Image (cartoon, helix red, strand yellow):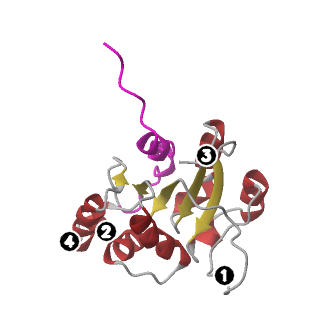
Amino acid sequence: MTDRGRKPFLYVVVCAAGIAGDVTTLIAAAQERQWDVGVIATPRGLTFIDTEEITARTGYPIRSAWRSPGDPRPLPPPDAIAVAPATFNTINKWAAGISDTLAVGILCEAYGMGVPTAVLPCLNAAQAAHPAYRRSLDRLREMNVLIGTRTPHQPGSPDVAASFDWEEALTLLTPEPPARP
């Protein structure tokens, strides 16, 4: 999975959800589990996070826009990807193959490259009721994307951050080995 002597590299894709500012919880947990981490943000997601703190913590620039031809790749290739928080918009575009942002483009390409990917949806129950969302989750499952178990919150719910389990992405990507009998 990784070159000898190199830690596995995790891309964390961050979308524009109110809890996105807490993504450092996931970054710190991944680093504690010996992952190197790079962050890719949707264009709107970029406005929800502390870019200076994340850059200092990861040692890598946050990517949000396409690079120009010939520009160096600022991040190594991913060994796995965690999409957290994942919004209604990003989930539906990803499942439909609409690659209009760097973040969704990376997710679409990851499928073809066989990169293990986990997604932690963060949306409200009214959005989740839309039939496109259910079809998108089904499509992502067909693509072997690992989907978090969090139930959508009620619109306007103030306790979204308290119930969001950032580390579930890591658990999905690196499950504990089965216990020996």
Question: Which of the 4 image quadrants contains residue 95?
Answer: bottom left
Whole-angstrom CA distance, mark 2 to mark 4, is 9 Å
Tell me which amino acid carries mark 1.
Arg
Are the residues at dot 2 and dot 4 in contact (C-beta closer than 8 Å)? no
- Residue at 50%, 42% (x, y): give it: 167
Whole-angstrom CA distance, mark 4 to mark 3, is 32 Å
- Residue at 41%, 60% (x, y): give it: 114
Q: Earlier in the sequence, mark 2 or mark 3?
A: 3
Tell me which amino acid carries mark 3.
Thr
Residue 92 appears at what percent x and percent y?
A: 34, 73
* Picture layout, residue 54 above or below residue 47: above
Q: Residue furthest bottom?
A: 69
Q: Earlier in the sequence, mark 2 or mark 1?
A: 1
Q: Which residue is mark 4?
A: 131
Tell me which amino acid carries mark 2.
Gln
**Span highlighted in magenta in the image:** 155-181
In this rendering, the label closer to the viewer, 2 or 3:
3
Q: Earlier in the sequence, mark 4 or mark 3?
A: 3
Q: Secondary structure at mark 4?
A: helix
The label on residue 67 is 1
Q: Which residue is mark 2?
A: 127
Was residue 93 drawn as part of the magenta stretch in this picture? no
Tell me which amino acid carries mark 4.
Pro
Q: Which residue is mark 3?
A: 25
Does residue 87 appear anywhere in the picture? no
In this rendering, the label closer to the viewer, 2 or 4:
4
Residue 149 appears at what percent x and percent y?
A: 33, 46
* Picture layout, residue 65 above or below residue 143: below
